[in-house]
Amino acid sequence: MKSIDVNGRKIQYQVFYDVSEYGETYETVFYEGTRIVSRKKYYLFGEPVSKEEPREIFRLHFNVEDAHRTKSEIRAAIERRLELLDRKGQIRRGELI
């Protein structure tokens, strides 16, 4: 995973690539912080195993490392998603206006 700094916020990201009969697709997944996930050692049985994983905050359905997109275009898309994420937190806290 690679990391970037957006307005003082440290975010990690990973680019995924897929090819199918319909063409190629890119997806960039952004992470912030970590979370503890508990799963069974073997799918349905076994002792539970706790594992620390990065916490996904949002996805963009294009490659942020694409040379055909400008820095300002990518920055605007990331900042827009972060604003929406912050707004969801404000609504949870009861700050409607």
Image (cartoon, rainbow, N blue to C red):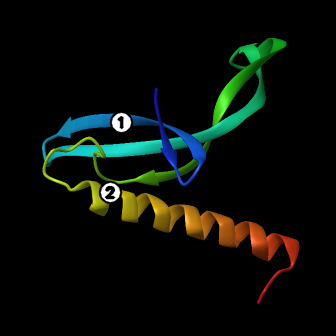
Q: Position of residue 77 (x, y in %)?
A: 39, 63
Q: What residue is at 18 percent from the left and 39 percent from the top? A: 20
Q: Secondary structure at mark 1?
A: strand
Q: Secondary structure at mark 2?
A: helix
- Relative vertical location of residue 36 with respect to residue 76 in this rendering, above or below: above
Residue designated by label 1: 15
Quadrant of residue 87 in the image? bottom right
Q: Position of residue 26 (x, y in %)?
A: 27, 44
Q: Amino acid at mark 2?
A: Ile
| Badge 1: residue crowd in 10 Å (few <14, some 14–19, many ≥20) | some
- Count of numbered labels shown in the rendering: 2
Left or right of residue 67: residue 79:
right
Left or right of residue 9: residue 37:
right
Q: What residue is at 57 percent from the left and 68 percent from the top? A: 83
Quadrant of residue 31 in the image? top right
Q: Amino acid at mark 1?
A: Val
Residue designated by label 2: 74
- Relative vertical location of residue 56 with respect to residue 58 in this rendering, above or below: above
Q: CA distance from mark 1 to mark 2?
A: 14 Å
Left or right of residue 57: residue 96:
right
Q: Position of residue 39 (x, y in %)?
A: 76, 22
